[in-house]
Image: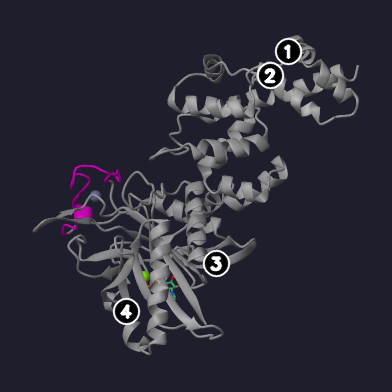
Amino acid sequence: MFEVVIGLEVHVQLNTKTKIFCSCATSFGEEPNTNVCPVCLGLPGALPVLNEEAVRKAISFGYAINATINKKSIFNRKNYFYPDLPKGYQISQFEIPIVENGELFININNKTKRIGITRAHLEEDAGKNIHHGDESYVDLNRAGTPLLEIVSEPDMRSAEEAVEYLKKLHAIVRYLDISDANMQEGSFRCDVNLSIRPKGDEKFYTRVEIKNLNSFRFIQKAIEYEVERQIEAWEDGIYEEEVVQETRLFDTKTFKTKSMRGKEDSAEYRYFPEPDLLPVILTKEMLEKGKNIPELPDEKRERFVREYKIKEYDANVITSSVEMARFFEDMIQEGASPKLSVSWLTVELIGRFKGDTTIENSPVDSKKLAKLVKRIEDSTISAKAAKDVLDFLMENDIEVDEAIDKLGVKQVSDDSAILAMIDEILSKNKDKVEEYKNGKEKLFGFFVGQVMKASKGSANPKIVNKLLKERLST
Ligand code: ADP
Ligand code: MG
Ligand code: ZN
């Protein structure tokens, strides 16, 4: 029996307006090599100036994960050659990162598990190499974008735990609004470090690193493949040869990992303190201000359970993203009940999203969905009709009440109208009324059904039930 050991490195692009060491914009999708200057092009003599916003964002992340925030940290040069790295080194942090010894909590099989966060350090992103057939290009727009590299302890024991950790981390940086964490655009990238060991063994075995995974699904698949590869090698007696410290790439077509290069030791990077930057000394003001972080997913979940009396499971789903949590609370603000808001948001609305529709660009906003829920609660429409109304609202930009009118799905809740229908049904079925009064109570359902049918489903069933009972008891 084997145990899997996983530690994750996540590169989060901080959403500052400008780059970490110059004032070029960080905007995504611009013409290649337009957001550049002598500093981020690495021209000789150009000097870096640290972006204070990036430091502030790193501090709030530190508070969010209960970490030590180092009052003094330093930048280092990490030397390596690559075409998208114009200076021939990356400015990063090494011995003294800005954030150390943090933690976050994940939920696995209804148990809370702590995952240690070794460090989070600031560094600059590289540019991008673009390959077209035989030709290769370099776009340096991304060079110098601030990154927070977040390194976990090797505390995860399954693909599931790794994905839960990443989802929690993703939620935290979104809640803090320090990154847009868009995985497709590469602003939240993950390297998986993985080894196996016989269960019960204390020591760690050789790890491989799988680089640059950009979706939760690929991460899951990459881990599954790699675990199997290592176990097989062990069982075939070729573990030593097959599992070596190296960097591997995940092929998104075959779902296999393959060797890319041997793993550098940190010595090969010839780290040394960056002579063009002073140590970073945090002021009291920066630390005090940094403590002002918004409510985070765990606290929000607990508050939702307490305040709105919704189920823990639902609260977990809703707080998994800051946008969904906001949408939910906006619905309640608008007067919808928490219970119906949960299902109409997490099941009905999200279930109708297609393509790249998300909470943020949903054609039905929180106000409209709340109104729809209120129309169920005040019996204007049945829950069943509300589904048709929602279908219609997804396609048409009109008000809820207008849609209800247009579809003609209003419930009849008016006593006299319903009584008229009841009386007609009862007079048509005198024999059955007789039977009912003689004790065949089962027939009640038959009468309800007939009234509903006569109203073409528009009668409010609660009122039909109530009035029928009254009529039949006289
Ligand atoms: P590097 O930059 O060389 O990849 P880091 O210290 O930045 O080194 O990251 C190492 C990562 O590998 C950490 O997330 C750590 O938890 C993880 N790790 C270390 N040893 C093992 C191991 N034996 N098995 C799995 N993960 C490991
Ligand atoms: Mg690594
Ligand atoms: Zn620049």
Mark 1 surroundings: few (<14), some (14-19) or many (≥20) residues within 10 A: some
| Foreground of the two, 116 or 321 | 321
Residue matched to label 3: 115
Residue 459, which numbered label? 2
What residue lies at 42% left-to-right and 49% top-to-bottom?
Answer: 179
Separation of marks 4 and 3 at Cα, in angstroms: 25 Å
Name which of mark 1 and mark 3 comes first in the sequence. 3
Q: Nearer the viewer, mark 1 or mark 4?
A: 1
Mark 4 surroundings: few (<14), some (14-19) or many (≥20) residues within 10 A: few
Q: Nearer the viewer, mark 3 or mark 2?
A: 2
Separation of marks 2 and 1 at Cα, in angstroms: 9 Å
Name which of mark 4 and mark 3 comes first in the sequence. 3
Quarter residue 103 falls in = bottom right
Instruction: Find the residue positioned furthest to the bottom.
Output: 237
What residue lies at 44% left-to-right and 83% top-to-bottom?
Answer: 205
Q: Does the residue tagged 4 have its C-beta within 8 Å of any atom of ligand 1?
A: yes
What residue lies at 73% left-to-right and 12% top-to-bottom?
Answer: 421
Residue 265, which numbered label? 4
Q: Is residue 462 at all visible to an observer of this figure?
A: no
Q: Secondary structure at mark 4?
A: loop
Q: Nearer the viewer, mark 1 or mark 3?
A: 1
**Given the image, on which type of amino acid does mark 2 rest?**
Ala
Name which of mark 2 and mark 1 comes first in the sequence. 1
Separation of marks 4 and 2 at Cα, in angstroms: 74 Å
Name which of mark 1 and mark 4 comes first in the sequence. 4
